Every structure is written in C-alpha cells, then in structure tokens.
Image (cartoon, grey):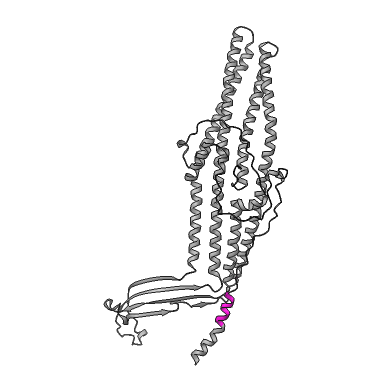
C-alpha cells in the first residue's frame, strides 16, 4: 500500500511536467518588418522594370543561375567555369557549409537514445573495513569480467533539444546562403576583372595606334626639318610626344599585367599559369530590369543569410530559457558479469542497471547566482543584434541597387556626350594637320589637337569599361538571378 501511495503521489508531478513540456520556451519566430518601397527611385520612370507587386518569399537555397551568359562572351563563360571549380575562397566557403551541416546532424542526434557497448575485466581488492573485518584481516583480490550495453536518453521535456536542433538547422541554412553569397561575389569579381582586362586591352590598342601615329608624324617632321622648312623646336616637340606615348603604353602594359595576375588568383591559378590574349572591349549595351524592391528579399543571398541568423538566435532563446526547468535523463545498462571468463555468457551471469551510475535522473536547478538569467539576457540581446543586422543588410541592398541604376543611367548620358567629344576632337585634329602642312598654324597646335583626341578616346574606353562593370554590379546587387529576356 505504501508503494502504491508513493506512485499515486508522483502522478501529479509527472502530469505537471508534461503540461509544462507542452509550452514552447522559444518565442514564436516571425521575420521582422522592414520598410520596403514600392519601387526603386532610379527605376520608377521605367515601366519595363516594374512588375506586379508580390510578397517576398525566402529563396536562400535557390541557385543563382549562369547570369554572365547574357554578355555572349565565350571567354568569360570559360573563366567563370574555371573559377567555380578551382577558386580557393569558394572551396573554403563550401567546407564551412559542410561543417554547419555536420553540426546540424550532431544536434539532431540529441533527439535519439545514445547506445554503447563495452567488454573487459576489472581487478579489485576490497579493504578490510569495507567488509567489516579487523584492520589486520587479509582480503582477497578478485577479477570481474563484464560485457554490457548501455542506453542513455534525455527526455526533451521543455524543448531544449528541439530548440538546439532548430538553431543548428537555421545556422546550416545561413551558411548555405553565405556560400551562395560567396559564389555570387566570385562570379561578379571574375566578370568585373575580365572587363577590366578588356578595358586595358582597348586602352593599350589606343596607345599602340598613338605611338604608330607619333612615329609617322616624327618621320614627316624630320623630313621637313632636313629640308629646312621648320626649326629644331618642332622636331624636339615631335620627339617628346612620341616618347610620352611610348611611356603611356608601358604604363598600360603594367596595369594590364597586374589585372591579369588578379584574375588568375580568382581562377585558382598562379599568375605564371595564366595568360589571356589581348582583345579590346566591345561596347556593352545590355539593359537590366530592376524589378521590385520586395524581390531583393528573395534573391539576395546575404539577406537570406541575415534572416536565417535571426531564426537561429530566436531558437537559442528557447535553449537559454530551458535552463530554468528540470532535466530528465533516462539511463540503463544490461549485460553479463562473472568472476570467470568461461562463465561470462551463462544465464546466471546476467545483470542490469536502471538509473544513472552517478548523479540523479531528474535534476532541478535552484540557485546559480543569476547565471541562467544572464544566459537568457545574452540570447535576447544576440537576437536583437541579428534583427538590426538584417534590417541594415536590406537597406544596404536597396542602396547598392539604386547606386548602380543611377550609375548606368548617368553613364548612358555621359557616353553619348563623350562620343560627340571624340568625333569633334578627331575632326579638329584632322583640320590641324591640314593647316600645319599649309603653314597656317604651328606644330604646337597640332600637338594640342592630337592630345585632345587621345584624351577623349581614352575617356571613352574607360566609360565603356565602367558601363560593363556597373552592369555586372547591378546584376550582383539584384541577387544574380536576372537573365536576358
């Protein structure tokens, strides 16, 4: 009867624990609200970039796509493929992703019982006092052979294990998004590095033409000087311009070599293993639709990573709160033991143990000097930090898109004006050459006209490169999912 009464007394306690266990200790996770404009400021006047409004859905696991193929450049396609397979930073990001997935599996293992087995002997000589014998009594040493299997299982009464699993899963998803972010950054860096190299090729071709023209001009001036038609001053000026053009050509060669080395590193190669034949940049005229600001919350992997970091931090609040509640661990062992190895597996050698070998099955924290509350406060503060980081990431994404939209819009206008400047400078240089031959102007006027043509052509080549790189930057800012339509 006394035993039954003890059992009846324990029932309310067990029921109370089960009721408490049904209460989730982690706050219900909801993505914080962010102010999302209805349209991008720089794209509001472009109907082609507008789509029907929709609520953003996370897409951190979605592949970014081969967006660089919109440039229709087979060399760029090949470079992107090489970078995807050999870039060391991307491999490091992939390794971090594998680590987070392994940690997720480790957390999930806590949902299941832990089983182990063991076999071996123990040798023991008890003390006379432990046997109730006189102090000078002789006790015999004995050997005990044991083979057993043990089971340990933490009953997840208050969701600590489940919250740990949720946090690990969100962290793994965060690292998945971070891997996509590194991948997208690498793709954009390769494309921009490639266009930088092609811009320098265009610049180098321009300087080569300039050197060739300066050499032809020097030959003409030398002939006129030999004939006594001009003074040595014009000859010296012509030689100066040729030397200056040759120096600028060497400077361009130096810049190209550096850019080629940087591109080699992105491809996972030593600079000595990589060379790209010169090929001047052709003008890029791709129009990228910006879409809606809300779509950035779906496409940008860095935003997805920041959102998953919030989810993980929210789950860790539940882990911290669970420290205030009892911890129930069920343990047991069963096997055989015998003083003789030959008798170890006989039926009479069976043995079992229920309950912990050390400590207690149910532990309840009472006083810890505020340590558990500090853990909860820290978890909440970490969540608030991640919320602020998420909102800041969204704001930065909006800014990057607006910056690149504005850059491309203004560049289009600037390039139209620059094309006119090149055309008029070339016409002025042509007229100056004619007037110089006729003796109407000095050679200094010819030099000024030629310098103006070179400067305007150089600026035009730089603008072409800037437009190509800004187009890549816009696609990257949009999340890398845009494709030619």
> Is residue 467 one of those drawn in magenta?
no
Q: Which sits in the foreground, 61 or 473?
A: 61
Q: Is residue 476 visible?
A: yes
State which quadrant residue 229 falls in: top right
Residue 286 x %, y %:
62, 38
Q: Is residue 129 above or below residue 426?
A: below
State which quadrant residue 455 falls in: top right
Q: Residue furthest bottom?
A: 1
Residue 230 x %, y %:
64, 10
Would residue 428 appear left or right of 330 to someone viewing this image?
right
Q: Which sits in the foreground, 414 or 238?
A: 414
State which quadrant residue 16 falls in: bottom right
Residue drawn where x is 61% and y is 20% of the image:
241
- The quarter of the image holding the C terminus is top right
Residue 284 x %, y %:
61, 35
Residue 482 x %, y %:
60, 45
Residue drawn where x is 50% and y is 65% of the image:
108
Residue drawn where x is 56% and y is 41% of the image:
68
State the predominant SS element of the stretch in magenta. helix
Stretch of the chain drawn in magenta: 13-24
């Amino acid at each position: 009867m006394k035993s039954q009464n003890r059992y009846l007394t324990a029932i309310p306690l067990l029921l109370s624990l089960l009721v408490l266990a049904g209460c989730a200790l982690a706050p219900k996770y909801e993505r914080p609200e962010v102010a999302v404009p209805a349209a991008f400021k720089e794209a509001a006047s472009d109907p082609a970039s507008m789509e029907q409004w929709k609520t953003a859905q996370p897409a951190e696991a979605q592949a970014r796509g081969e967006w660089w193929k919109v440039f229709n450049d087979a060399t760029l396609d090949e470079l992107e493929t090489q970078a995807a397979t050999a870039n060391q930073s991307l491999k490091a990001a992939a390794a971090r992703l594998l680590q987070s997935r392994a940690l997720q599996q480790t957390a999930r293992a806590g949902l299941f019982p832990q089983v182990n087995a063991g076999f071996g002997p123990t040798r023991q000589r008890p003390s006379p006092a432990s046997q109730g014998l006189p102090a000078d009594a002789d006790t015999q040493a004995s050997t005990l052979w044991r083979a057993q299997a043990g089971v340990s299982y933490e009953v997840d009464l208050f969701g600590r294990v489940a919250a740990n699993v949720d946090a690990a899963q969100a962290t793994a998803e965060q690292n998945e998004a971070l891997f996509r972010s590194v991948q997208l950054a690498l793709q954009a860096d390769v494309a921009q590095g490639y266009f930088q190299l092609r811009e320098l090729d265009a610049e180098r071709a321009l300087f080569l033409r300039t050197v060739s023209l300066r050499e032809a001009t020097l030959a003409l001036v030398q002939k006129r000087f030999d004939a006594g038609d001009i003074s040595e001053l014009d000859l010296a000026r012509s030689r100066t311009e040729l030397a200056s053009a040759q120096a600028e050509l060497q400077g361009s060669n130096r810049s190209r070599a550096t850019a080629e080395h940087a591109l080699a590193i992105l491809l996972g190669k030593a600079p000595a293993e990589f060379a790209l034949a010169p090929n001047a940049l052709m003008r890029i005229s791709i129009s990228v639709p910006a879409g809606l600001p809300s779509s950035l919350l779906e496409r940008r992997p860095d935003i997805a990573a920041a959102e998953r970091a919030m989810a993980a931090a929210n789950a860790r609040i539940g882990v911290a709160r669970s420290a205030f509640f009892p911890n129930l661990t069920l343990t047991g062992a069963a096997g055989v033991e015998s003083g003789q190895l030959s008798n170890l597996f006989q039926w009479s050698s069976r043995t079992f143990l229920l309950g912990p070998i050390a400590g207690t099955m149910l532990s309840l924290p009472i006083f810890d000097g505020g340590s558990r509350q500090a853990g909860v406060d820290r978890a909440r503060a970490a969540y608030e930090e991640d919320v602020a980081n998420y909102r800041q990431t969204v704001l930065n994404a909006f800014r990057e898109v607006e910056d690149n939209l504005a850059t491309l819009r203004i560049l289009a206008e600037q390039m139209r004006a620059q094309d006119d400047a090149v055309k008029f400078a070339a016409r002025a240089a042509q007229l100056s050459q004619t007037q110089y031959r006729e003796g109407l102007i000095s050679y200094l006027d010819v030099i000024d006209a030629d310098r103006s043509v070179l400067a305007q052509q150089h600026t035009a080549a730089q603008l072409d490169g800037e437009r190509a790189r800004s187009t890549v930057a816009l696609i990257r800012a949009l999340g890398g999912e845009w494709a030619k339509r």
